[in-house]
């Protein structure tokens, strides 16, 4: 019996790949993945909004200041523990759990080396983001960091063979303009009291480099996830372990003497731990998003979180709604619609397959 089979676009051929908006209408079997895709995007949006608000707060307030590199290490450590617990739950027993880790990690060293590339980049990127948010006001930081959307799109085309229509490229520009209009509202920066010295040029350079790192590492990790059989949680264990090691080396080089003198957890309180947990949770959410959606949609989720951050500022930080804010929101909504509506059409080619009947 001859049946038409949809051939997926791009270079990914993994059976579990449920790519993004470029796919045909989902079958009933694909609906759970579709639900997980948009649920993870929603959670990532909320996580990003809370993270930027709390991260900026803990870096500009007075009092004892924690060492940022230790927070990066703790976030990677918590992410590793959470991923291990999920794998243990999935395997159902300790013996199966240990066998799973041995088969996929200890006996596949080359695979771990491959994961070390995004692990190194993510760790350095997280350290740079703390540097950036410590030296830039919230508006400049968030606007400049939207460069990661453009870099992600470019790396997706180059590394994954993804195709974007002309209107999709325009939508990326529209998104950046809309977010810029919102974040360039001068009233935002006036609501924040800064208690530490700011070095805008250092912060700007940190954001630019982080944007490039984010685009490359995100697409590289997406290619790993969609091109192998290992689960997203196992990949997070690999990323987390390597991230802790790389993060510790970074801490020793940069601030080893300071940490040994003051203590690893110096300056930590409930708010700092909230930042660490949010950053750790965000790492897991990003992995789920790039597995079940794609990396450019992850960028849109992050951008939408900026709008939520502004709304939170209105409610809790006396931010006043302005015409700039309304226009910016309209641009962002339009860009999201354009990206979804004008995706390239996926070709459906006939393919002969023997029926099991």
Image (cartoon, rainbow, N blue to C red):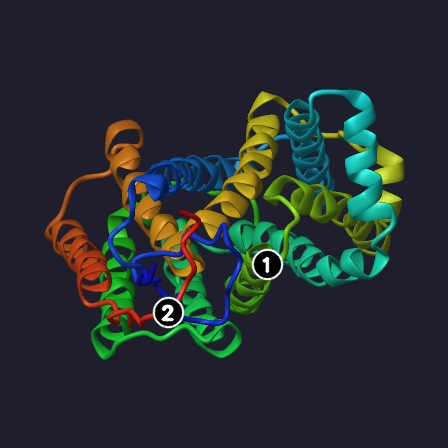
- Where the N terminus falls, by quadrant? bottom left
Q: Is residue 200 above or below residue 93?
A: below
Res 198 label: none
Q: Are marks 2 and 1 in contact (CB under 8 Å)?
A: no
Q: Residue at x 84, y 41 (%)?
A: 102
Identify the residue at image location x=56%, y=33%. 275
| Pick the front one: 89 or 210 | 89
Residue 47 percent coordinates (x, y): 44, 36
* Rendered image quadrant of residue 309: top left
For residue 319, what is the image quadrant? Answer: top left
Instruction: Classify residue 265 as left or right of residue 189.
Output: right
Q: Which residue is mark 1?
A: 221
Residue under the image location 20 percent in, 74 percent down: 167
Does 187 sit above or below residue 35?
below
Q: Position of residue 179 (x, y in %)?
A: 27, 58
Q: Is residue 162 visible?
A: yes
Give the mark, 2 or 1, whose residue is nearer the N terminus: 1
Which one is in front, 303 or 351? 351
Q: Residues within 10 Å of mark 1 (few under 14, many from 20)?
A: many
Q: CA distance from mark 2 to mark 1?
A: 31 Å
Q: Disc 1 on helix, strand or loop? A: helix
Q: Quadrant of residue 22?
A: bottom left
Q: Nearer the viewer, mark 2 or mark 1?
A: 2
- Circle 2 packing at 10 Å, graded few (<14), some (14-19), many (20+), is few
> Can the viewer see residue 204 in this picture?
no
Foreground of the two, 263 or 273:
273
Using residue 347 as the reference point, say whether residue 75 is left or right of it: right
* Secondary element at image label 2: loop
Residue 9 position, x and y percent, is: 39, 70
Front residue of this view, candidates 197 and 272: 272
Residue corresponding to mark 2:
351
Q: At which x and y percent is residue 51?
A: 47, 38
């Amino acid at each position: 019996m001859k049946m038409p089979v949809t051939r997926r676009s791009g270079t990914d051929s993994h059976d579990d790949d449920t790519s993004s908006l470029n796919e045909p209408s989902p079958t009933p079997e694909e609906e759970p993945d579709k639900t997980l895709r948009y649920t993870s995007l929603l959670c990532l949006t909320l996580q990003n909004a809370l993270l930027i608000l709390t991260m900026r707060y803990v870096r500009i307030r007075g009092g004892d200041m924690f060492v940022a590199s230790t927070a990066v290490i703790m976030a990677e450590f918590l992410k590793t523990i959470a991923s291990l617990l999920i794998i243990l739950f999935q395997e159902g027993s300790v013996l199966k759990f240990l066998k799973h880790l041995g088969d996929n990690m200890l006996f596949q060293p080359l695979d771990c080396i491959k994961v070390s590339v995004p692990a190194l980049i993510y760790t350095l990127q997280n350290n740079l983001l703390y540097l950036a948010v410590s030296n830039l006001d919230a508006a400049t930081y968030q606007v400049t960091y939207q460069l990661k959307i453009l870099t992600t799109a470019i790396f997706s085309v180059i590394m994954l063979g993804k195709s974007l229509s002309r209107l999709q490229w325009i939508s990326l520009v529209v998104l950046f303009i809309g977010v810029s209009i919102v974040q360039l509202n001068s009233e935002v920066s006036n609501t924040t009291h800064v208690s530490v010295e700011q070095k805008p040029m250092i912060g700007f350079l940190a954001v630019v480099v982080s944007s490039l790192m984010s685009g490359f590492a995100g697409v590289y990790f997406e290619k790993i996830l969609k091109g192998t059989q290992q689960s997203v949680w196992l990949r997070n264990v690999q990323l987390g372990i390597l991230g802790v090691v790389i993060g510790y080396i970074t801490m020793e080089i940069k601030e080893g003497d300071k940490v040994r003198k003051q203590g690893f957890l110096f300056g930590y309180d409930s708010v700092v731990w909230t930042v660490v947990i949010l950053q750790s949770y965000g790492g897991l959410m990003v992995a789920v998003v790039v597995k079940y959606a794609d990396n450019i949609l992850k960028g849109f989720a992050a951008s939408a979180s900026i709008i939520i951050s502004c709304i939170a500022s209105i409610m809790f930080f006396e931010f006043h709604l302005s015409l700039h804010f309304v226009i910016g929101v309209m641009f962002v909504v339009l860009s999201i619609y354009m990206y979804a509506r004008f995706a390239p059409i996926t070709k459906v080619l006939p393919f002969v397959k023997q029926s099991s009947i």
